[in-house]
Amino acid sequence: MREKVAKVIDSIRGYLQADGGDIELVDITEDNIVQVHLRGACSGCPGAAMTLKMGVERVIREAVPEIRGVEEV
C-alpha cells in the first residue's frame, strides 16, 4: 500500500512544486491514515489545509480506497 500511495504523491508533487511547495510521505498508520509533511511554501500557506483535504486526500483516496484520510505531521 505504501508504494501505491508514494506513486500517487509523486504524481501530484509537480503541482505543489509549481507553487514553491513540496510534499513528503512520512508514514501510513495501522488505521490507514497517510501522514505527510508539507515543505516549502506549502508549510506556511493558509490554504495548505484545504490543499491537503480537497486535493491530496481526494486524489489518494481515489487511487487507494483503503486509505481513510491524510494528515500533516
Image: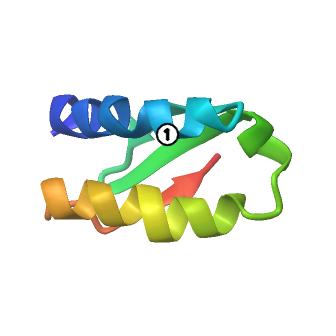
* Image location (x, y in percent) of residue 56: 43, 55
Colouring style? rainbow
Number of disc labels: 1
Other-residue count near label 1 (Cα within 10 Å), few / some / many at <14 / 14–19 / ≥20: few
From this view, report whether residue 25 is shown above or below residue 36.
Answer: above
**Residue 31 visible from this viewpoint:** no
Q: Is residue 24 left or right of residue 8?
A: right
From this view, report whether residue 34 is shown above or below residue 14.
Answer: below
Q: Quadrant of the N terminus?
A: top left
Residue at 59% across / 29% down in the picture? 17
Element at badge 1? Answer: helix
Residue at 65% across / 46% down in the picture? 73
Residue wearing tag 1 = 15
Q: Is residue 20 left or right of residue 67?
A: right
Q: Is residue 43 left or right of residue 2?
A: right
Residue projecting furthest to the front = 18
**Residue 3 visible from this viewpoint:** yes
Residue at 45% across / 33% down in the picture? 13
Residue toward you, 62 or 3: 62
* Image location (x, y in percent) of residue 66: 15, 62
Question: Which kind of residue does numbered mark 1 sit on?
Answer: Tyr
* Image location (x, y in percent) of residue 12: 39, 40
* Quadrant of the rendered image containing residue 71: bottom right
* Image location (x, y in percent) of residue 60: 28, 54
Q: Is residue 70 left or right of residue 51?
A: left
* Quadrant of the rendered image containing residue 20: top right
